[in-house]
Amino acid sequence: MKFLIIDIYYDGFLKKFYKSLAGIDLGYEENKHRIMRQLFGTADYYSKNLNLIGNISEDIIYNDKILQNKWVKEHGQVRFLDWLDGAHIPFTKIGFHSHWQNEILEQQILDYKPDIIYCQSLYDPGSVFLNRVKKITGAFIVGQVAFQVNFDKELLFVYDLILTSFPHFVPRFKSIGINSEYFRIGFETSILPKLKEMKKQYPVTFVGSFSRRHDNESVLAVATDVWGHGLVPKTSKYHGEAWGIDMYNILYNSKITLNRHISTAENHSNNMRLYEATGVGTMLITDYKDDLHKLFEIAKEVETYKTKEELINKVNYYLTHDKEREKIAKAGQKRTLKDHTYKHRMEELVKILNKYV
């Protein structure tokens, strides 16, 4: 199968990345390669592993104005350049449904001719746009979601299939007439050789999002060092945002790292930190979920908490019992590398798609 994977990157990450490239002019492919090397989000984990198991796949960062501008220049689509040219146009003035984004993406889709258009965001580039290119190309449209969603057929009608790491979302999508399957997140093993030991070893870290849908009280009470974005806490523990390889190195250099799920997850385990933390070999203490045991063996591969008091007690215990902490960390990594890599996930994805395509 031939996949085109459409992703959205946070503006904060893009600003930081292009600031690091100040004065360096790269072509489209090299620019994209350098972005992927930063390991933001799922980076090229899908395309890399899909290609590895015999498919053809390509990534597009839909909202990266600078990168998409390079594609336009190299492919001679000069009608876009008057609007796009010039770094003086700030990211904050580029909406997720801006005209230039859809115009360029449509040309990329027509040039690439994918069998599968895989959208990492359900609402970008949007059903109206996807419906148009679907009629033109006949592509099978897949969406993926691990966040709060409006179960509205009018907004999601274009998707032939929606994949979600929330098992409780599957019947909700089906109830509005959209095919849906449970599809877990994973860990990319090629990260491991890129990790570096830091001089500072963090006792207890938290790296994540802060919002009204997250219970922040427990992790802020216990973590010694905090990174994140959103409604960031006013505390001396907070060190700013951490993306990609910087985030992985923080996890790797932590004795313990904490996790907690968004309220939308309800009683289900699903988020990326489960696999990122265990994948780099750090002990994970996560909020208890009813189905966590299906992913990891509790108290042997990861630890859990239900209350702030329980979290405090477990953190204090494992900080003073090094051998037990390290044993759980190693077992968690072993389990992730055995069952939860993106190669495993892409093999699962192809099996799912073979039922529909």
Image (tube, rainbow, N blue to C red):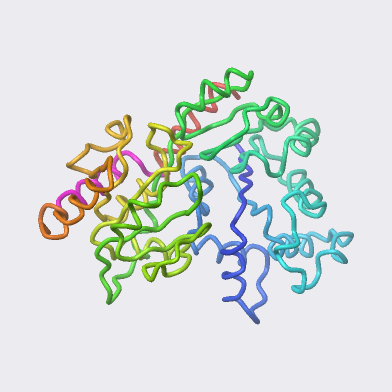
Quadrant where the C terminus is found in the figure: top right
Name the residue: 63% across, 79% down: 22
Q: Position of residue 71 (x, y in %)?
A: 73, 60
Q: Position of residue 105 (x, y in %)?
A: 75, 49
Name the residue: 39% across, 33% down: 268
Q: Pick the residue in front: 204 or 245.
A: 204
Q: Quadrant of residue 155?
A: top right
Q: Position of residue 326 (x, y in %)?
A: 16, 55
The total number of labels drawn is 0
79 left or right of 238? right
Question: In the rendered structure, which segment of residues is drawn in magenta?
Answer: 326-342
Magenta span includes 291 = no
Q: Pick the residue in front: 222 or 133.
A: 222
Magenta span includes 327 = yes
210 left or right of 105? left
| Residue 133, placed above or below residue 180 | below
Q: Pick the residue in front: 123 or 306.
A: 306
Q: Pick the residue in front: 110 or 225.
A: 225
Quadrant where the N terminus is found in the figure: top right
99 left or right of 169? right
**Dominant SS type (magenta):** helix
63 left or right of 331? right
Name the residue: 48% across, 50% down: 45
